[in-house]
Amino acid sequence: MCIRINDYQTSSRRHIIDKNIIAGDIMIYLDNAATTFPKPKTVYQEVMRAMTEYGANPGRGSHSMAVEGARIIYETRELMAKLFNLDDPMKVIFTFNATDGLNQGIKGVLDPGDHVITTTMEHNSVLRPIKELEKYGIENTIVQCESDGSISVDDIESAIKSSTKLIVTTHVSNLTGTIMPIGEIGQMCKRRGILYLVDAAQSAGVLDIDVKRDNIDLLAVPGHKGLLGPQGTGALLINCDAEIKHLKEGGTGSESSSMIQPNFYPDKLEAGTHNLPGIAGLNAGLKYILNKGTKSIYSHEKMILDIFINGIRENGRINIYGPEDINNRCGVVPINIEDIDSSEVAYSLDDKYGIAVRPGLHCAPLAHKTIGTEKIGAVRFSVGPFNNKSDIMTAIKALNEISKN
Ligand SMILES: Cc1ncc(COP(=O)(O)O)c(C=O)c1O
């Protein structure tokens, strides 16, 4: 399954799916919601180039290797700002994943006495920081979603109190794939003078997100999912003037004579050496997406998900969760075969058919409770830009066979 980059020129196990990507040929990978695989070929090449050609410490020296590293990092901020329509690339804060950005966003703006609203469809990366803040006198309301994962904007608005400072919602549920109405929520937040933080872990690189149009103050994205970069990358985009506290202090390569953390972006929130090889790979992932366009990536993923749902819909033993209308769903389809434990089904898919999926609770316990699967979990199929119809037909055949036995 693994790609060994140092022998990808010669390995007989390597095959080329199209001219842009390389991949192992052992499994059908339908676990893209956890992290995308494979990546565009240029991503592997850029990681390698950063490691071998200019792997100095960016921003920590004036020699040409450090300058090249700093250039790549700045260019990646610009690409990120372009993709999400953020005015100032210096307000793209690099993080190590979406969780890191969500923690920074949530803990950076909330103070004792504040109130925060979120929903039952959130990932633990939102729920846990918010629950942690209860210890510091920061109250929360978790708004109940419907059994298909959808949320009512009116219900969110009804939960607002005079102390509400922040609303946090996911853009796409990592369990049901439900697309949340972030534009409407953003508009309501703007009208009510409340900050809006969007968790775009499942949508960045797939759906069109415009922080200005959608009135998003803070956008947390992973670099390693839809943006097609390596693991260990992510970003928090800041589209507001609110005060954001730094959660760590350290070297930034700037204002070195001062023992106080710099008060300007991005240095204020980026202490310590960057993940340069990761950011270089993310740079290539962003270029791939900007070149291809999210519209075409989303329509491809929607088309193959539709085939998948239609291929198992008639099977009376299979329960499919999430929105009925494919237009309200992105990337993800969770299923169960009657009340069989999801881990057993995932094991069979892996062992007998070479299909990688994710069973269990997907770090989203309240979301499972919302759709009624908290006891057995669900088998989550999630597609990426390089899955094709043949992957999906194999998955349909496998599920129909497993359900018979
Ligand atoms: C909706 C959602 N939010 C947050 C995360 C956390 O992302 P990361 O693993 O990049 O920290 C995930 C990961 O699957 C997710 O699906």
Image: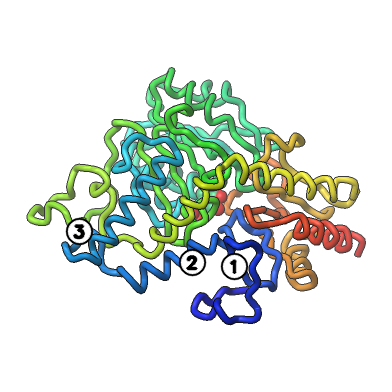
Within the image, what quadrant is residue 96 found in?
bottom left
The percent coordinates of residue 306 (x first, y second) are 77, 44
Q: Secondary structure at mark 3?
A: loop
- The crowding category of the residue bearing disc 1, from other C-alpha atoms within 10 Å (few below 14, some 14 to 19, many at least 20), is many
Given contact means CB atoms under 8 Å apart, are the residues at marks 3 and 1 in contact?
A: no
**Which residue occupies the extreme top position in the image?**
191
Q: Residue at x 52, y 45 (%)?
A: 204
Task: Point out the tag, 3 or 1, that comes first from the N-terminus.
Answer: 1
Residue situated in front as seen by the camera: 63 or 104: 63
Determine if residue 399 is in view.
yes
Q: Is residue 259 left or right of residue 47?
A: left
Q: Amino acid at mark 1?
A: Ile
Report whether the residue tagged 2 is closer than 8 Å to ligand 1. Answer: no
Amino acid at pointer 3 = Gly
Residue corresponding to mark 1:
22
Residue 377 position in % (x across, y down)? 70, 54
Identity of the residue drawn at 42% across and 55% down: 283
What x and y, as percent, mark residue 115?
41, 31
| Quarter of the picture holding the N terminus | bottom right
* Residue occupying image coordinates x 52% and y 22%: 157
**Disc on the earlier residue, 2 or 1:** 1
User: Of residues 253 and 119, which is closer to you in this image?
Assistant: 253
Distance between the alpha carbons at the discs numbered 3 and 1:
37 Å
Name the disc covering residue 251, or none: 3
Q: Amino acid at mark 2?
A: Tyr
Q: Is residue 177 above or below residue 225?
A: above
Q: Is residue 397 above or below residue 217?
A: below
Please give the residue where the numbered disc 2 appears in the rendered image.
44
Which image quadrant is residue 251 in? bottom left
Q: Is residue 346 left or right of residue 190?
A: right
